[in-house]
Amino acid sequence: MIKLGDRTFVSYITEKRVKVVALDERTGKLYINDEYKGRCDLDFILNKIKELELQEENRRWLFEDERKLYNELSEIIKNQIISSNSE
């Protein structure tokens, strides 16, 4: 999450732009892709955004690990010699 100035917070979660504009120390306005969604509890929404960012980061690492594993297994399968002798 990026803090712009002292009242605006921006993040990108699942390819959506999430913006929170603080009205005061307790309340904010929530925008998703620049569409106003309503007022929210500032501390609650900022904590939720942090949680979602962490979940997305963990998913991204999981995807990278799966892709790496797939590539390694693909190489093993390509280089594997299959014997014609039955056991």
Image (cartoon, rainbow, N blue to C red):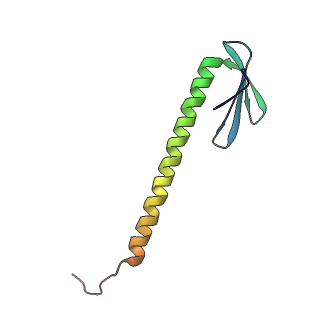
| The N terminus, quarter of image | top right
Residue 47 quadrant: top right
Relative image position of residue 32 (x, y in whole percent): 72, 33
Viewport quadrant of the C terminus: bottom left
Q: In the image, is 70 to the left or to the right of 57?
A: left
**Which residue is drawn at the image coordinates 78% and 32% (left, top)?**
35
Q: Is residue 62 above or below residue 82?
A: above
Return the x and y of residue 75 as percentages of the image width and height: 43, 71
Residue appearing at x 44%, y 69% in the figure: 74
Residue placed most toward the observer, 87 or 36: 36
Direction top: furthest residue: 25
- Residue drawn 41% across and 66% down? 73
Q: Position of residue 69 (x, y in %)?
A: 43, 60
Occupied quadrant, residue 79: bottom left
In the current view of this chain or complex, which residue is farthest to the left?
87
Residue lying furthest front in this view?
A: 5
Q: Which of 86 and 74 is in front in this view?
A: 74
In the image, taking residue 85 as reference, residue 10 lies left or right, namely: right
Residue 8: x %, y % from top left: 72, 25
Q: Which residue is drawn at 50% across and 53% down?
A: 64
Q: Relative to residue 43, is residue 36 drawn left or right?
A: right
Q: How many marks?
A: 0
Quarter of the figure with residue 25: top right
Seen as rendered, the residue at the extreme right is: 35
